[in-house]
Amino acid sequence: MSTATRVATHKRPPSAAVRRSGYVGTMVFDVVSLVAINGWPGWDVLPFLTSDTDRVIGVVNASIVVHLVVFALYTLWDPRGLRAAGEILTSGFGVVVTARLWQVYPFDTPEDWSGWGLVAHLLVGLGLVGSVIGVISGVAHLVQACRRPG
C-alpha cells in the first residue's frame, strides 16, 4: 500500500482547535437564528407561514436554545461520551419539533397541482426520520464511548 493510500485511509480526527471553531460557528448560527425568528425580521415576514406558527415557535426556540447550550459545553469540554449525549439530546428535540410541525402544519401551501403541499409534508417527514436516526446514532456512539473511554 502506498503512503498516499495509507494517509487517505487513516485520516486523523480534527484537532481540538478545529472542533472548537466549528462549535463556535454553530453557536453563532444558533444565536442569529433566534434573533431572526423572534426579533428582526421575525418569522411572520415569511409568506408561507401561517398564524399557526405561534403554536410551534416555543418548541423551535427550545430546540435552538438546547442546541446552543450543548455546543457551548462542547467548546469547554468535548469527550466522545458528552458529544454522544449531546447528539441524543439535540436529535430528541428534533423529533419533538418535527412531530409538532407535522401535527400543526403551519405552512400555507397551495392545494393546486403545484405539489408544494406534498413537498412540505415530505420534508417535515424526512426531518422526523432524520431526527430519529440521529437519536439512534447518538445511542450507538454513547455505547462506543462507554466501551472505549478517551
Image: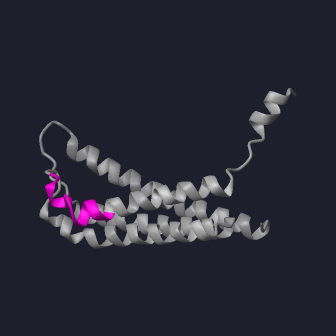
Name the residue rendered at 76%, 37% in the picture.
9
Depicted 61 relative to depicted 118: above or below: below
Q: How many marks?
A: 0
Viewer-proximal residue among 55 and 10: 10
Quadrant of the image containing the N terminus: top right
Seen in the image, is 7 located left or right of residue 47?
right
Q: Position of residue 131 (x, y in %)?
A: 46, 59
Above or below: residue 117 compared with residue 19: above
Which residue is drawn at the image coordinates 57% and 62% (left, top)? 136
Residue at 25% over, 45% down: 118
Q: Is residue 44 magenta?
A: yes
Left or right side of 88 for 115:
left
Quadrant showing the C terminus = bottom right
Q: Which residues are magenta?
A: 34-46
- The residue at 17%/56% (across/down) is 49
Instruction: Name the chief secondary structure element in magenta.
Output: helix
Could you say which quadrant of the image residue 65 lies in?
A: bottom left
Which residue, as the protein is rendered here, is positioned at the far right? 1
* Left or right: residue 84 compared with residue 39: right
The image shows residue 44 at horizontal and vertical percentages of 15, 60
Q: Is residue 33 magenta?
A: no
Q: Is residue 27 above or below residue 58?
A: above
Q: Nearer the viewer, residue 109 or 150?
A: 150
What is the image's colouring?
one colour
Q: Position of residue 36 (x, y in %)?
A: 26, 59
Q: Is residue 23 left or right of residue 100?
A: right
